[in-house]
Amino acid sequence: MTALLLDGKKLAEKVRSEVTLEVAAFREKHGRAPGLHVVLAGEDPASTVYVRNKEKAALEVGIAGAVHRLPATVTKAELVELIARLNADADVDGILVQLPLPKALSAKDTEEILDLVDPRKDVDGFHPINAGLLASGRPGLVPCTPAGSLRLVDEACVLLGGRSLRGAHAVVVGRSNIVGKPVAQLLLQRDCTVTLAHSRTKDLAAVCATADVLVVAVGRAEMIGGDAVKEGAIVIDVGINRVEPKEPGGKAKLVGDVAFASASERAGAITPVPGGVGPMTIAYLLRNTVFAARRRLGG
Ligand code: NDP
């Protein structure tokens, strides 16, 4: 079997055009665009690129807002003050604190800062209140990568002739709070039977080989080979890994957590890396911003 390619770029464009219409309707009703505010502390090169991409995407769909660029020497107190100000500002609908925060801030500091974001403006969906709402099956702000991954699963079901998720066995590899756990919750809400695998899982390949839906979010280049993919499975590869060139002067490349070539020979549908989950993450950030604005103000 040769898998269908799940084109995240194309699907993200579709989501973005839906968001553009929603932004216009919001502006019509409230006399202003939804506002997204991004906090970027320090100069981590990857974060700088991610934030630039988010800013550009927001502008393209008509979302307003700002990037608050702070030096790597920013203190916890200064960040706390900024978040409090954004929480109190009625024109701020979404707040995103780009991670990682500078090294001088501990993991506990990061957690405390994220917990200060008003859950109604938490467009990353990381706040414990939003995590709790998701776990309870109640509406809230859902983390962007998991929401985008689920949309790709839905798209695959359509492309594969109207497959149903009800009763399907979904295996999620990786149990982080920002990807693995919320993906598992979303699949559970769709009546999948969900297995959440992690670094202590025994015989991971055998577990994966039973999955009708396989979502991998680990961060290890091509760790899941084609032999761990069930014939016809829907495979969503969340991992992004930079592989350095083998020869001097060669180019580094990005690969996923799934060995794409061998997995595509068995899967029914599969996401590429890059061009799969990545673009969907940004599209769902925009969607969350409009959702947060409409929920607070109506419309
Ligand atoms: P974390 O490092 O927070 O979590 C990794 C998870 O993988 C952990 O639960 C860990 O298990 C598990 N794991 C590690 N090694 C193994 C192994 N050998 N076998 C099985 N499980 C293992 O990562 P994130 O969830 O933040 O991100 C995962 C990947 O997704 C990364 O490559 C990241 O770059 C990418 N990503 C991509 C996004 C996108 O937009 N496309 C957005 C966010 C992330 P344990 O808990 O036992 O330690």
Image (cartoon, helix red, strand yellow):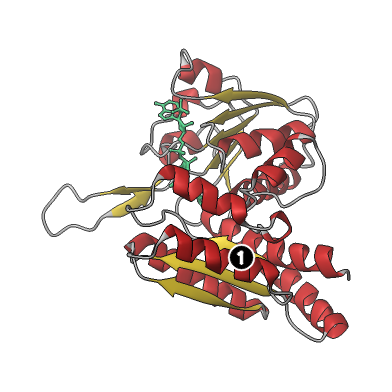
Does residue 73 appear in this view?
A: yes
Q: How many marks on residues?
A: 1
Q: Name above or below for residue 208 compared with residue 240.
A: above
Place residue 184 in its image quadrant: top right
Q: Which residue is mark 1?
A: 84
Task: Rate crowding at label 1 as few (under 14), some (14 to 19) or many (20 or more) other CA atoms within 10 Å.
Answer: some
Left or right of 126 on screen, residue 20: right
Kindly give the residue lying farthest to the left in the view shown. 248
Whether ligand 1 has any atom under 8 Å from the Cβ at mark 1 is answered as no
Left or right of 275 on screen, residue 25: right
Q: Which quadrant: the C terminus?
A: bottom right
Q: Which quadrant: the N terminus?
A: top right
Of 106 and 176, the residue lying toward us: 106
Of 27 and 163, the residue lying toward us: 27
Write the residue at 53% across / 48% down. 112
Please tell me whether mark 1 sits on a helix, a strand or a loop.
Answer: helix
Of 293 and 129, the residue lying toward us: 129
Kindly give the residue lying farthest to the front in the view shown. 77
Write the residue at 82% across / 77% down. 26
Does residue 13 appear in this view?
A: no
Residue 246, horizontal then vertical, whole percent: 17, 47
Q: Amino acid at mark 1?
A: Ala
Left or right of 67 on screen, residue 120: right
Of 116 and 132, the residue lying toward us: 116
